[in-house]
Image: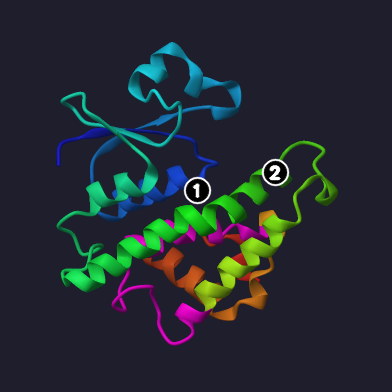
Amino acid sequence: MNRFRLYGNSNSGNCLKVKWAADRLGYAYDWVEIDIYAGETRTEEFMAINPAGQVPVLERPDGRTLAQSNAILCYLGEGTDLVPEDSFDRAKMMEWLFWEQYSHEPNIAVRRALLRQPGATESDIDPALLAKGRRALGVMEMRLIARDFFVHEQLSLADISLVAYTRVAHEGGFDLSEFPAVHQWVRRVETALGIEHAEAALA
C-alpha cells in the first residue's frame, strides 16, 4: 500500500485504533493531528476532506478518502493476519465491530468524554450510561472467560477496535477489576500491539 495520510486526534480511541492497526501492519503514513476541541474538523478545508466533520479520515495518494474508524480498519486489514480467512470467523469479527460502535462506544467512550470536561461531575451525567457501559463490559467478560481474543484465538481487528476505549474505561468511571477476563485481555492486546499499558490494565 502506498503512503497515505491519517487525520486524527491523539485523545480519540476511534483515531488511535486506526493508527495502531497501521503501525501493527507496517504501513507508511503521515499522521495529521486535528484539534477537535478547537473546531478544526469544522473548517472549510477539513470539511472538503470529510463533509461529516469527523475524524479519523484516511486519505489515499489518489485523493480518495475513507472515514469511520471501523471501515478504515477493514480497509487496512484486508488480506492481512488481522482478518480471519474463514468466512464465519470473518463475519464474527464484523459482528464485534458493529457491536463496538452500537453498544460499547456510545456508552463507555461517551461517559469518559463527559467526565473529562472541565468541571464535570457524576451528577451531570445520565446514570444510564454507567449501567449500559457495565452491561457492555459484562458481554465482553462472558466472551473472554475461555478465550484470549475475540475471534479464532488470534488478534484481529475486533480486538483492536474494542481495546481502544476499554483500556481507558477507568477514565469514564468503570472499574475493570470487576471484569478480570476483560482486564487481562486489555493487557494482552496492548502487548500484542506494542503500546503502553493504560492505568486500568496495570491495576
Q: Look at the numbered discs 2 and 1 and tell me whether their residues touch, using CB distance below 8 Å.
A: no
Please report the residue visible at 23 percent of the width from the left and 45 percent of the height from the top.
27
Task: Based on the picture, tell me whether residue 152 belongs to the magenta stretch.
Answer: yes
Q: Give the alpha-carbon distance from disc 2 to disc 1, as whole Å.
A: 14 Å
Judging from the image, the colouring scheme is: rainbow
Please report the residue visible at 52 percent of the width from the left and 43 percent of the height from the top.
12
Q: Quadrant of residue 67?
A: top left
Mark 2 Cα-neighbour bin, 10 Å: few <14, some 14–19, many ≥20: some
Disc 2 secondary structure class: helix
Query: According to the image, label 1 marks what residue?
Result: 13
Q: Quadrant of residue 68?
A: top left
What's the mark number on residue 153?
Answer: none
Mark 1 Cα-neighbour bin, 10 Å: few <14, some 14–19, many ≥20: many
* Quadrant that contains the C terminus: bottom right
Q: Which residues are magenta?
A: 142-170
Q: Residue furthest bottom?
A: 146
Query: Residue 6: x and y, percent?
Result: 34, 34
Q: Amino acid at mark 1?
A: Gly
Q: Residue furthest top?
A: 44
Query: According to the image, label 2 marks what residue?
Result: 114
